[in-house]
Image (cartoon, rainbow, N blue to C red):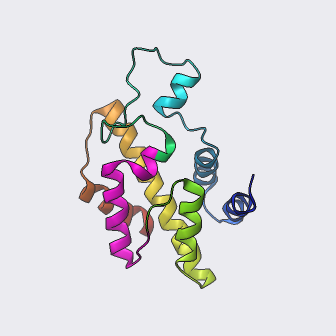
């Protein structure tokens, strides 16, 4: 594990977020979420089950694709960044993404807020993905961003 990755975990556990949110983030960073690819690796789904991303239908549903590189999710991140007046290019993995995200603000108080919003984004993405798969409920990019704003303020 790199020094940067250790720093992400250290900052994660210092957070005052609810334990459920911390556990979800920890699982995400360890790439242990039950994405379609992870379920297939563990042989919990059959080979006939599609591993394609539920949002874009293109690439396989890995954590990196699902939370960063999927076309639809990229639009969600761009809208959130526009809302916050932040601009940076999406990096190749979640660790670098959260490090860049937190470094956009310098004050400790604002950094906590940035972490909160980052966790709201990934939480809404995961919940939207699950609602789409299990409840056939589809949200568009704007609805997801609205949900992120609501979640951030709660």
Foreground of the two, 22 or 61: 61
Q: Quadrant of the C terminus?
A: bottom left
Q: Position of residue 83 (x, y in %)?
A: 34, 74
Is 58 above or below relative to 121? above
Q: Position of residue 144 (x, y in %)?
A: 31, 55
- Residue 112 location, quadrant: bottom right
Foreground of the two, 145 or 41: 41
Q: Position of residue 150 (x, y in %)?
A: 37, 64
- Residue 90 location, quadrant: bottom left
Left or right: residue 64 versus residue 137 is right
Q: What is the number of callouts on the image?
A: 0
What's the magenta region? Answer: 65-88
Is 134 above or below relative to 43? below
Foreground of the two, 118 or 48: 48
Residue at 39% in and 38% down: 130
Asked whether 34 falls inside the magenta stretch, the response is no
Visible residue check, residue 110: yes
Q: Position of residue 122 (x, y in %)?
A: 47, 54
Visible residue check, residue 147: no
């Amino acid at each position: 594990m790199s020094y940067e990755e250790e720093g992400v975990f250290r900052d994660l556990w210092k957070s005052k977020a609810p334990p459920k949110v911390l556990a979800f983030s920890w699982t995400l960073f360890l790439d242990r979420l039950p994405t379609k690819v992870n379920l297939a690796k563990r042989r919990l789904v059959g080979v006939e089950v599609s591993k394609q991303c539920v949002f874009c239908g293109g690439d396989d549903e890995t954590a990196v694709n699902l939370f960063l590189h999927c076309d639809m999710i990229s639009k969600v991140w761009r809208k959130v960044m526009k809302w916050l007046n932040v601009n940076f290019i999406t990096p190749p993995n979640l660790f670098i993404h959260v490090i860049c995200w937190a470094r956009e603000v310098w004050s400790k108080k604002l950094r906590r807020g940035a972490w909160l919003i980052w966790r709201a984004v990934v939480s809404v993405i995961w919940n939207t993905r699950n609602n789409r798969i299990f409840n056939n409920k589809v949200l568009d990019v704007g609805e997801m961003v609205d949900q992120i704003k609501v979640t951030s303020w709660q």
